[in-house]
Amino acid sequence: MPRIAKVVVDIALDREFDYLIPDHLHDGLRLGSRVLVPFGRSESRGYVVGLASESAFPSLKTVKQVIGPKPLVDEPVLALARWLGAYYAAPVEHAIRAVLPGAVRRAGAGFKEQLFVSPVAEAAPDEAALALLEKRCPKQAAVLAALRRDGGRPMAELTRELGTGAAVVRALAEKGFVRIGRETAERDPFARQVFLPTDPLALMPEQRAALDLTRRAIETRSPPVVLLYGVTGSGKTEVYLQAIAHVLDGGGGAIVLVPEISLTPQTVERFKSRFGDNIAVLHSHLSEGERHDEWHRVREGKARIAIGARSAVFAPVRKLGLIVVDEEHEPTYKQDESPRYNARDVAVMRGHMQACAVLLASATPALESYFNAKRGKYGLAVLPRRVDNRTMPVMRIVDMRLEAERVGRPTVLSGDLIEAIHRRIDRAEQTMLFLNRRGYSTALICRKCGYVAQCHQCSVSLTYHKSVDQLHCHMCGAVKSVPGACPECRDPAFKYTGVGTQRVESVIAKVFPHARIRRMDSDAVTRKDAYREILGDFKSGRIDILIGTQMIAKGLHFPNVTLIGVVYADLGLHLPDFRASERTFQLLTQVAGRAGRGEVQGEVIVQTYTPFNTAIQAARRLDYEGFCDQELEFRRELNYPPFTHLVCLTVKGASEEKVAFSARALSKALESALAGNRVFLSGATPAPLARIKGAYRYQIMVRGPSVRAITPAVNQAVKASKWPAGVSCSVDVDAFSLL
Ligand code: ADP
Ligand code: ZN
């Protein structure tokens, strides 16, 4: 019998504490249980992350109380959390926090609580005792029988169904046969929606092959991971749906991860229509109560499939048979605070730990995944064609340098693009214009002295938002009014340079005064329903031209859109990031996928100042593999991922001097700690975004053959460093953003 509980307390401390388990709590306390423990001079809540029979510490405090009838974290998820902490160099309690949605952790406050009755397994009466109970108190016997059959039940439901009073249940609790706790009542976020059921489609031969390979992975884990590379509209989703149906047939459950931005009503509907109530949606747009309930439906096994963004990878799905990661290349799968995990990689690890298959899918798989497939680590399935052989859109590149020469100044819209939009309006077809930057102009510049309006606490220029006539910092959200004259030289004439979605909108409105235009970016979509509303209007043809940021680049499916304009393709190309080229290729390909999903062939017009860039050219030729092979060569030569793992350390603080000093000291320490490990160390340099929210930032990049070759030394060096007050260091393993 374990006598010791290892507890991680909510108050952030990177440690496990040992507590004695008192006798009366033995029954209820498990791995993953929520507990109340004495801590310091007061008490704290925490999670049991381990059980032991002995402790290295002589005098231990005692667990005060077990909260809730069942542990919130089951053992497989707990194991995953431990791995998460170790791999991503994060404190245990951060890892535990990551695997439990906030709504679940906070449950209790503000919810409709109800009494919940569950049988105590350890105190199950034997035959003789049952017979006696049957004879003396038949009502109690009936309640107990029902509970042992169904597991826990809400008190109200139980007494109603059996026609007994609560007193009967309480009597059973006094005998120790059942436990009465508090749980929250369930809400169904989709209660008022009707989903028309759909049947599986007859698959195309390539889809069939992809499904067969996935089924093999599900049954034999050989291969353990399948990479499904399929162009947009090639029917990948239908493959997931049928693979999941297969898992359900075998009595298992599944997780589907989609990027937050693609978790649209459209997407949810496709899954709901096929699987009905069997699917739970874990979505940040739901109310806290709804999120809590959906999670519990999964934990109780009432929903066997969980669909959601990043954190759904931790969903407590029972008998997990398959994890699907849609758009597996998406940077948003990476969490940008501790633990800085990548949900795709966690999915692969969870698959490994729980012997379940993993299906990674994308129209532009990440180089890491492509590389794993090429060297045989993952199985590969390819869907090269669109369903029904619909043609891929034609992509045209417009050289904006020539355009500027022709017009005499840089322009927002080329003649080609304007003409193409005209044709669409004449034919009552729709256009989407894409620009991954909101606001009106990117910078306010003084023509005379060259002063650029910058955020006073971030090293980025402020973006002008015309609708509110203000300057916004897209880094920290600071808002400033537009100065009447240059703060440096007092010249009153400013110039707005660079283009944002608002500027595109106003140019379009001038060129097409009769067109119906809408803009969709995070400025335009502040209300919860605005997103749905705009998409609804677009779908029903009440909008001719939709202008937007990446919000419109993903997963949307409109048959009447026959033209996509990429206003400025170079935006992401010049970032100091070795993935800049890959990102640009992915983005162009994804955006192009929105065109021509109906009967008419689609057209994509890409405006650029670097028309011969390899990413842009490869996207035009629809040449994913060619692009990857070339890019892999480059990465191999320079020892970048996927040939190495990259760990990025960021040292931050208000004093630049202290930050620089600490970063250099850390870099020195790492140099000696990592010597001989085939590890590349960059040395401490100011980060590309040298200042955010007033904090100076220095970076150290470490690349090595494996994370294990890097993190132990990094952890140790970070712990051993003497950090001056106000200076902190964060560690990002397999970093995505290097800014
Ligand atoms: P992807 O996920 O690759 O972008 P989808 O699964 O969304 O592609 O498929 C695009 C469209 O083709 C959808 O409308 C889908 O219902 C349809 N579709 C998929 N597979 C088939 C099939 N085998 N037969 C007919 N239509 C299909
Ligand atoms: Zn700022």
Image: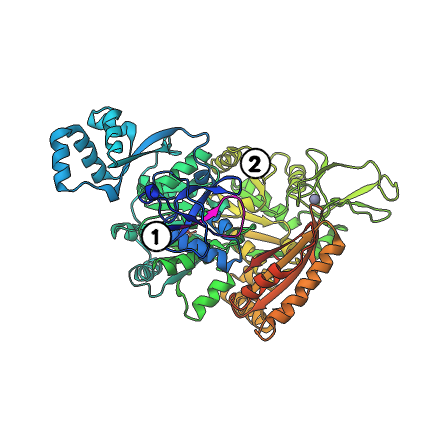
Residue 231 visible in rendering: no
Task: Locate residue 546 relative to residue 386 in the image: left or right.
Answer: right
Say above or below: 312 vs 484. below
Q: Which residues are magenta?
A: 5-15
Where is residue 280? Give x, y as percent: 37, 41
Q: Quadrant of residue 56?
A: bottom left
Say above or below: 384 vs 252. below
Say above or below: 352 vs 94. below
Task: Locate residue 587 relative to residue 144 in the image: left or right.
Answer: right
* Cα–Cα span, label 2 and label 1: 53 Å
* Residue 208 vs residue 408, the one in the foreground: 208
Residue indicated by mark 1: 2
Three-letter code, disc 2: Val
Q: Quadrant of residue 518?
A: top right
Residue indicated by mark 2: 525
For the rendered model, the colour scheme is rainbow
* Residue 47 vs residue 700, the one in the foreground: 47
* Residue 595 vs residue 231, the one in the foreground: 231
Where is residue 165? Give x, y as percent: 24, 24
